[in-house]
């Protein structure tokens, strides 16, 4: 599932492409994923785009926001005057734009379009009042996130209060916002920590290393425009590149690039693929 670096990449591009555009009409082909009144969007201008962990908010001039969670396979693709020469559309955009998986189309002024495609349809779009956003359902429950309000002290406190496996805690969005399976795997490998260890048994210096490792892998994710697993593409229609640069994630059977003494193994922890170097992370 797209994580902080992927959604941040989407946010930055949407901000560039949508800012100043006016919404002229909204076509909704899959009413189940859309809630709110589309009339509230008509004639409103895009003021800016914000990200809350894995959730996006497109903020409008009339006091409404379009809140979007792309979940597993959601794609937001822009075409219009602010992207003069769009790159070739990735094959991951199954059916094209608009196509049979295009569930919502935001028609913009100056002939622009923002398409929402979603093969699995787990994603959702909600219209909410911008000033209610931070207390609204999902966003109100998010834990502090890296690069913002997740301080080392807070991180230490969160881990000290639970004996759940450290990897499971890292991915719990109510404890820490934005970290999912790919970056949790890579950060734990970088910090040389066994993903199964109870969070409250980590030593203080290990927690500090993990805190730094999380920031490092997320930064790398953003540098490469996110990881294109499954269906992830950026609003220009291209794929991210981080999947070619993962540290542990997806490396089962390959030798560890740090110790060269063991091969990565893979197992499932709380249902999620977990990749470890048995030597570095024992
Ligand atoms: Zn190793």
Image (cartoon, rainbow, N blue to C red):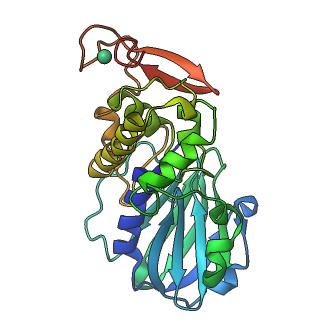
Q: Which residue lies at the image location 58% right of the left edge and 39% below the top edge? A: 169
Q: Nearer the viewer, residue 155 or 62?
A: 155
The residue lying furthest to the front in this view is 204
Residue 128 position, x and y percent, is 67, 77
Q: Nearer the viewer, residue 156 or 232?
A: 156
Residue 12 position, x and y percent, is 36, 66
Is 1 placed above or below 200 here? Answer: below
Q: Quadrant of residue 260?
A: top left
Q: Is residue 157 left or right of residue 208?
A: right
Residue 178 can be seen in this image? no
Residue 178 position, x and y percent, is 50, 51
Q: Is residue 150 left or right of residue 158?
A: left
Can you say which quadrant of the picture contains the C terminus? top left
Residue 93 can be seen in this image? yes
Q: Nearer the viewer, residue 226 or 113?
A: 226
Q: Which residue lies at the image location 64% right of the left edge and 27% below the top edge? A: 270
Residue 264 position, x and y percent, is 38, 14
Ligand 1: image quarter: top left
Is 139 placed above or below 2 here? Answer: below
């Amino acid at each position: 599932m797209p994580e902080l670096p992927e959604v941040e990449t989407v946010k930055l591009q949407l901000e560039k492409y949508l800012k100043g555009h006016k919404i002229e009409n909204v076509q909704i082909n899959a009413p189940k994923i859309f809630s709110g009144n589309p009339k509230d969007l008509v004639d409103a201008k895009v003021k800016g785009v914000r990200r809350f962990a894995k959730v996006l908010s497109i903020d409008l001039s009339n006091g409404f926001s379009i809140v979007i969670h792309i979940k597993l396979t959601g794609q937001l693709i822009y075409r219009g005057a602010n992207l003069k020469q769009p790159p070739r559309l990735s094959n991951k955009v199954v059916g094209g734009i608009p196509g049979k998986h295009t569930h919502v189309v935001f028609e913009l002024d100056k002939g622009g379009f923002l398409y929402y495609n979603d093969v699995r349809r787990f994603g959702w779009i909600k219209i909410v009042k911008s000033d209610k956003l931070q207390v609204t359902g999902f966003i109100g429950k998010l834990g502090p996130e890296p690069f913002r309000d997740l301080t080392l002290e807070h991180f230490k406190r969160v881990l000290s209060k639970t004996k759940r496996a450290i990897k499971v805690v890292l991915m719990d969005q109510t404890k820490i916002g934005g970290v999912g399976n790919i970056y949790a795997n890579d950060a734990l490998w970088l910090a040389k920590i066994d993903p199964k260890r109870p969070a409250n048994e980590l030593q203080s210096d290990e927690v500090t290393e993990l805190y730094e490792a999380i920031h490092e892998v997320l930064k790398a994710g953003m540098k490469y425009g996110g990881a294109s697993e499954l269906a992830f593409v950026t609003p220009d229609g291209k794929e991210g590149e981080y999947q070619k640069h993962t540290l542990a994630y997806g490396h089962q059977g390959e030798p560890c690039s740090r110790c060269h003494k063991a091969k990565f193994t893979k197992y499932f922890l709380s249902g999620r693929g977990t990749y470890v170097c048995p030597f570095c992370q024992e």
